[in-house]
Amino acid sequence: MINRNELVTLLDSWLEPSKIKDYTFNGLQFEGKNSVTHIGCTVDVSLDTLTKAAELGVDFLITHHGLIWGGIQKITSFDKNRIQVLCDHNINLYCSHLPLDIHKTLGNNALLIELLNAKNTEEVFFDVGYYAEINTTYHQLKKIIQEHISEKIVEMNFGPNKIDKIAICSGGATLDLKALFEASDKGVQTILSGETNSLYYHYAKELKMNIICAGHYATEIFGVKAVSREIHKKYITQKDIIYTFIDIPTGF
């Protein structure tokens, strides 16, 4: 078993939550058992994920989207139901939102770049993403994304087929037009993100940019999995620890 406080200290040292401004609390959001034997990871906190964690016997859950957004004003409705599950089963809940997007080795965006066989320039895109150099075509890139991230994509194929610079930001970066304008100014031909909206269509067309959105959920499974793998490596000699990825896709 692993001591909870030791595990929290380890995660904090890797992800450095205090260094990144966010609109959620990054770190241990709910204190559960002192001794950890089953580590779970998932993308979202929801009644479904917490109930599944409880059924599996998870006692330390690492998540990208946590329980607290801007601070809890009252504990009623879905907040009460979620907290009730945590209380009843004494589950520790550790959240890493933006720190797990921008992390240079464990982050969603760094891992997406690696998956695409691109080179991370380490120049930050839209606060938490990265620009990357790549030698490919739009159609080859789309094929890799559909094979390894999600078959279901939203695409705006208005840019060139030859791609040598890409901007990557998991989640909802392409809900904000500022991301499009920033990438365009940097000479990017293609943006990969999670989700977008209709406002992007005409701007992307007029700027001659490619947009591929592979799903908010699907682009953010990589970080929590990587963190879980690193914990496993750290405690490889402790055979009694169980590791589980709780996969509850949202379709978005």
Image: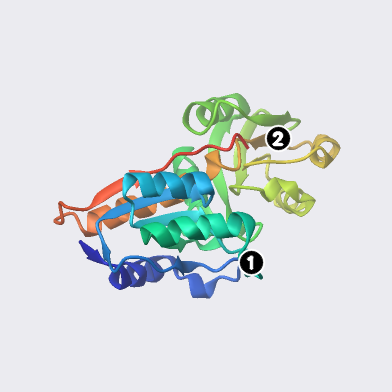
Q: Observer-nearest residue: 4 or 212? A: 4
Above-or-below relation of 192 to 6: above
Circle nearer the N terminus (1, 2): 1
In the rendered image, which quarter contains the C terminus? top right
Could you tell whether 190 is left or right of 67 in the image? Answer: right
Give neighbour class at mark 2: few <14, some 14-19, many 20+ (Cα, 10 Å).
many
**For mark 1, what is the residue?**
23
The reply to whether residue 157 is in sight is: yes
Along the viewing direction, whichever of 41 and 72 lies nearer the viewer = 72
Using the image, determine if residue 7 lies above or below residue 236: below
- Image side of residue 56 versus residue 152, left or right: left
| Neighbour tally class for label 1: few under 14, some 14-19, many 20 plus, Cα within 10 Å | few
Q: Are marks 1 and 2 in contact (CB under 8 Å)?
A: no
Which of the image's four quarters has the N terminus? Answer: bottom left
The residue at the point 55 percent across, 31 percent down is: 136
Give whichever of 142, 12 is nearer the camera.
Answer: 12
Percent coordinates x, y for residue 64 in the rendering: 50, 54
Between marks 1 and 2, how big is the CA–CA gap?
Answer: 30 Å
Across and down, in percent, residue 175 comes to: 74, 47
* Residue 9 occupies quadrant: bottom left
Report the amino acid beneath label 1: Tyr
**How many numbered marks, from 0 up?**
2
Mark 1 lies on a secondary structure that is: loop
Residue at (66%, 57%) from the top-left corner?
A: 126
Instruction: Say what secondary structure mark 2 lies in.
Output: strand
Residue type highlighted by circle 2: Asn
The residue identified by callout 2 is: 210
Viewer-proximal residue among 101 and 138: 101
Going by the image, does 1 lie left or right of 223?
A: left
- What residue is drawn where x is 56% and y is 42%? 217
